[in-house]
Image (cartoon, helix red, strand yellow):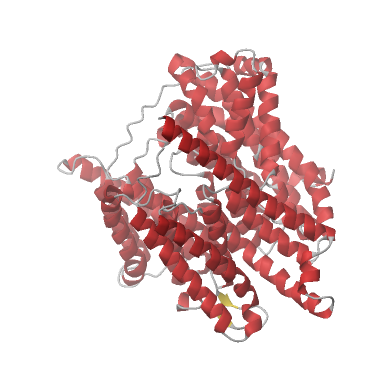
Amino acid sequence: MSYVSLPRVQHIVASGFIAAVGMWVAWISYTQQPSEAFLFPRLISTVFVVLALWTFVKAILGWTKVGNGVSRRDFVWLLPGLIIALIYIFWGAKALGFYTAGTIAFFILLSFYDPSPHGVAKTWIKRVIITAGFLAVMYGLFAMLLKVYTPREIFF
Amino acid sequence: MEFLYYFGDVFTPISFGLLLLGTIGGLILGATPGLSPTMAVALLIPFTFHLAPVQGLILLGAAYTSTVAGGAVSAILLKIPGAPANIATTLDGHTMAKQGKGAQALQLSFLASAVGGVIGVLLLIFLTPVLAQWALAFGPSHLFWLAILGVTVIGSLDSASVVKGLLSGCIGLWLATIGFDDIMGAQRFIFHPALGGGINIIAALIGLFAIPQVLTMFAKGRSATNAEVIEVEKHSIMDAVRELLRRPKALTIGTITGSVIGLIPGVGGQIAGLVAYDQTKKFSSEREKFGKGHSEGVIAAESANNAMVGPSLVPLLTLSIPGSPTAAVLLGGLLIHGIFPGTDLFDNHPDVAWTFINSMLIGQILMCIFGLYVAGLAARVAQVPQSVMAAVVLGLAVFGSYSVQSSMGDVYVMATLGVMMYFLERFGFSAAPLVLGLILGPIAEANFIQGSMIAGATDGMASYFLTGTLNIVLIAIVVASIAYSVWMELRSRRYTSKEEIMG
């Protein structure tokens, strides 16, 4: 296995971001009061910064040996699913109601990533049945068995 | 023999029902490629929150045991290991299945798993109380170093890059400090209202283990499950038992290797299976048959990966150091019920500790019985399309993380950590040390603060934390584990470079 093809720019960006987080954590730990409350964070943030900078420098020099990054193909396939999942979690679940948003997100994700042909009616019927099954199981499990009261909002 | 006193508690209707549920569910989940044992146990934790501690642990323990064993089904019938622990099983198991000996391979894998698993749990039963008593001698400085040891051992041994493994551990330790400080009540790193109460362990566990797998399935695109299930023909179980008894060397090597590797924190079932397979091959008189459908290969790999389950819980239940990522999730399951491993567990909650351990013993036998019958069904489940699997796991992750505290903040934390972990994994970081940092962070900090108070009243920090036999031993182990991992990493790269030059 060759490491030469590792995406260097991706590694620089990722390790640079982690180093920035590490320095921010160290800055807060060393400047915030009361200092006693930040004793432990100071200890770990120091190690954090050293390791993060070491990783960042290695990435800049092209010495990174582990991690293949995200390929263009993977990213293109990942992005729609990630966006749908994030809309569902950060907006839909609260605005539409847990079960409604969950069912819609499930159906969209299932349909989008399903390799079955989209032009066949049978495929869509199967997807609707699987989604209905998912809704029934989730409702039975969380609402009826565990008695979890989820946000209902404008729908269900 | 205290464990015998609590043996009957496993057979109460609820406990036994949960044991059955965890065993059968675990076998099916384990057989499903893409659902790792760690993720399966993490997704189950929200359900245990609504149960009594012992019942919750029984469910988690049963799922842990049977997901590892269930992974053999897809390894044998589909040539897709259900979990990394089953990689070695694929080598001979699938070849046996192609030769029309699929049923025999499955029977041997479950029988060997049960033998290895029972011996592993017996080790857990007899070693744990001894180590727990020994843990009584630990003061704050030792407990601090133990927590650091837990993070560094998993960070260095469980990661492809030592630096990135340790950095993952640091990120976990930092995440554990978010929220209000316990002693001064000061706010630390609360940059969003959802973080006011700190990071909820269950939400974090679900996010860190489930969401990256969901995103990985998304990234694969519209890939159909093309794997063909090999039909299982009828085969007498007694013949399989006789075949197992004819191969005592493979069974012994597998069980011993798995048990020893399980005791070493950070070294998982994948290593146990592969090392056992390799050693059995070395000592076998029929080594030319390995890789061509030899039953010894299946027996060695499966006895090893289940034998490591029990011993991997020894450092967890006595010293709070999980032996594997799944054991780290189990630690989270203990802590949410306010139960701390070590002497607290065995002195104050002996019913919980022993009923849980006993249930793992019974679970091994149930796993063997049901494994033989559920295998066919589990192989079908393994063919569930990834599109369905990804959407189901996402739904379970959202509902599960919300259900713990009825908090949307937990769902946001779960999603943020999950997406972050997916990208971190793509760059060589690992979830296990991060989780360890998150779980052991509060233990490390509490003992660090307590130790620094004692140090302030005595000879100072350096003297308190860096001197004394036990401190020095623990520091030496931390340094040795890091040094060993660095050496191994450099050695493997040197070989890789040589191969590149040669090739």
Visible in this render: residue B11? no
Residue B246 % position (x, y): 67, 14
Residue B251 % position (x, y): 67, 24
Of residues B488 and B341, the one nearer the viewer is: B488
Would you identify the image quadrant in which residue B381 lies? top left
Residue B337 % position (x, y): 65, 62
Residue A43 % position (x, y): 63, 71
Q: Is residue A83 left or right of residue B206?
A: left
Q: Residue at x 65, y 31 (%)?
A: B114
Q: Is residue B385 above or below residue B287?
A: below
Would you identify the image quadrant in which residue B440 lies? bottom right
Of residues B367 and B490, the one nearer the viewer is: B490
Query: Which quadrant holds the N terminus of chain A?
Result: top left
Visible in this render: residue B479? yes
Q: Is residue B430 left or right of residue B300?
A: left
Would you identify the image quadrant in which residue B451 lies? bottom right
Q: Is residue A80 above or below residue B295?
A: below
Q: Is residue B456 above or below residue B281?
A: below
Q: Residue at x 54, y 41 (%)?
A: B26
Query: Which quadrant holds the C terminus of chain A?
Result: bottom left
Q: Residue at x 50, y 25 (%)?
A: B91
Total number of numbered labels? Answer: 0
Of residues B234 and B86, the one nearer the viewer is: B86
Q: Is residue B65 above or below residue A38?
A: above
Q: Residue at x 23, y 44 (%)?
A: A125
Residue farthest toward the bottom in the current orientation of the protein: A33
